[in-house]
Image (cartoon, rainbow, N blue to C red):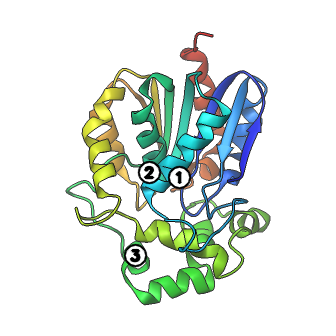
Amino acid sequence: MSYLDEGQGHPVLMVHGNPTWSYYYRHLVLALRGNHRCIVPDHIGMGLSDKPDDSRYRYTLDSRVADLDSLMAKLEPSQPVTLIAHDWGGLIGLAWALKHPQRIARIVLLNTAGFTMPADKRLPGLLKLGRDSGLGALLIRGFNAFSAGATRLAVKKPMPAAERRAFTAPYDSWAHRIATLRFVQDIPLSATDPAWATVSELGQRLGEFAHTPALLLWGMQDFVFDHTCLREFRRAWPQARAVEYAEAGHYVLEDARAEVLAEVAAFLQAHPVAT
């Protein structure tokens, strides 16, 4: 498991989703490393981490939470941390947080979820294709459709070619695209899905963090983690500060970079952590 551990001060744990990797947080690390210790893992199968096949690794949400637990037990076993999470990183990071609530000092979420699908939300067709069909699996593993497509569909502002290449670089072969597919296939839609129990429990227990300082930064043009997801977090955490970016997509750190960095800096300053 590859990870970035840079800077010094209060630890900030940044958890990415699919199909990104630690590169997604590059500007946030640069902004925070002067006063914070930035811990940014690449999930197994993602980024610069190993990409084992199914015979050597079980690509499920519970495996991701266990990986994060092992990493943090090694790197920072006791000090409270600030959790920053995006996409699947929200489910992974918050599920880990439920195991160690005393370790969570502050929470920053960027277009993610912490619950099963809201009743008025449906899985978008492109994700359903990847999750449930052989054609979708072929497109993702054979043609890198998920990672490459996201560099265009997950942003509203065109991403420079060099940055598109960086986002997709770890997923350069059929074997190296296993996690981008397995994440999609792990989307829980019913109680028979492996991730359902963990995600359902997380949704039921989100209120346990209602008094934890929280910041919700949302690209409102996201067609997956859209306004319905933001609404659910606001219900669970009515005291959280929520900022909507009307012209930003799923990769809100790309579309509204300067604004997001400023909000995070102000939030961390407004809620200092005792040392």
In primary-sequence order, the first of circles 1 and 3 is 3
The amino acid pointed to by label 2 is: Met
Q: Which residue is mark 1?
A: 248
Residue 91, above or below 161: above
Q: In the image, what residue occupies the spot 60% across and 28% down?
A: 77
Q: Quadrant of residue 164?
A: bottom right
Residue 258 is tagged as none
Q: In the image, what residue occupies the spot 56% across and 28% down?
A: 82
Q: Which residue is mark 3?
A: 131
Does the residue at mark 1 contact the one at mark 2 (Cβ under 8 Å)?
A: yes
Q: Which residue is mark 2?
A: 220
**Gap in Å between the C-alphas at discs 1 and 3?**
25 Å
The amino acid pointed to by label 1 is: Ala
Q: Secondary structure at mark 3?
A: helix
In primary-sequence order, the first of circles 1 and 2 is 2
Q: Secondary structure at mark 1?
A: loop
Q: Position of residue 17 (x, y in %)?
A: 54, 55
Q: Position of residue 6 (x, y in %)?
A: 77, 35
Q: Position of residue 11 (x, y in %)?
A: 65, 27
In primary-sequence order, the first of circles 2 and 3 is 3
Q: Quadrant of the C terminus?
A: top right
